[in-house]
Image (tube, grey):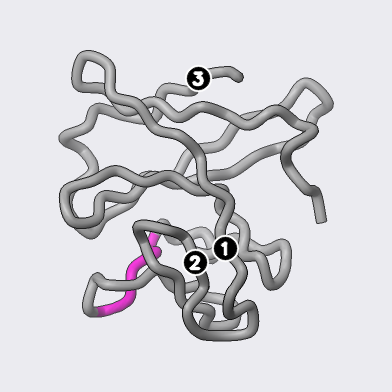
Amino acid sequence: MHSLYVCPEHEIGEGHARTFSWRSSSGWLGEGFVIRFRGQLYAYLNQCPHQPLTLDYGDGEFFDAEMQLLVCRNHGAMFEPATGKCVAGPCAGASLKPLQTRLTDGCVYVELPPEEDVELE
């Protein structure tokens, strides 16, 4: 796996997100996001399991108004921030694809998945 630098940790406040992207060796552009929820950092591929669309519709906003669930802006699917599991909407029971995060010297990194582990829709 390859690590990707995202940002300094202090730039991701509670209930906020930071998006990132990368290009694979075959040219596929991957997109992901890191959130802070209840003090913990979580990262996911930015793709709804319902349809191959980004959750944030490009605006970097992932949380609902109460900052308790992640929301797909396209069709309203709702996901638990800590698990990525869809709890309501057209893909209920499915999950976002998690990415491993790590902190090094106050900076957030994500471990990118091998291409063969990413299902391209």
**For residue 38, side relative to residue 69 (left or right):** left
Counting from the top left corner in percent of width and height, residue 105 is at 21, 14
Q: Main secondary structure of the magenta part?
A: loop
What residue is drawn where x is 80% and y is 49%? 120
Give the residue number, with chain letter if any, for mark 2: 85
User: Is 27 rendered above or below residue 25?
Assistant: below
Earlier sequence position, callout 3 versus callout 2: 3
Looking at the image, do the residues carrying marks 2 and 1 touch, with CB atoms under 8 Å apart? yes
* The label number, if any, that marks residue 59 in the structure image: none
Earlier sequence position, callout 3 versus callout 1: 3
Looking at the image, do the residues carrying marks 3 and 1 touch, with CB atoms under 8 Å apart? no
Q: Tell me if mark 2 has few (under 14), some (14-19) or many (20+) residues whose alpha carbon lies within 10 angstroms of its own.
A: some
Give the residue number, with chain letter if any, for mark 3: 3
Earlier sequence position, callout 2 versus callout 1: 2
Q: Where on the picture, by quarter, is residue 112?
A: top right
What residue is drawn where x is 39% and y is 32%? 101
Q: Is residue 42 magenta?
A: no
User: Is 88 rendered above or below residue 95?
Assistant: below
Task: Please state the extent of the stretch shown in magenta in the rendering.
Answer: 61-65
Give the residue number, with chain letter if any, for mark 1: 95
Dot 1: what SS? Answer: loop
Distance in Å between CA atoms under marks 2 and 1: 4 Å
Q: Tell me if mark 3 has few (under 14), some (14-19) or many (20+) residues whose alpha carbon lies within 10 angstroms of its own.
A: some
Amino acid type at circle 3 is Ser
Distance in Å between CA atoms under marks 3 and 1: 23 Å
Counting from the top left corner in percent of width and height, residue 97 is at 58, 51
What residue is drawn where x is 66% and y is 63%? 53
Q: Tell me if mark 1 has few (under 14), some (14-19) or many (20+) residues whose alpha carbon lies within 10 angstroms of its own.
A: some
Quadrant of image for the C terminus: bottom right
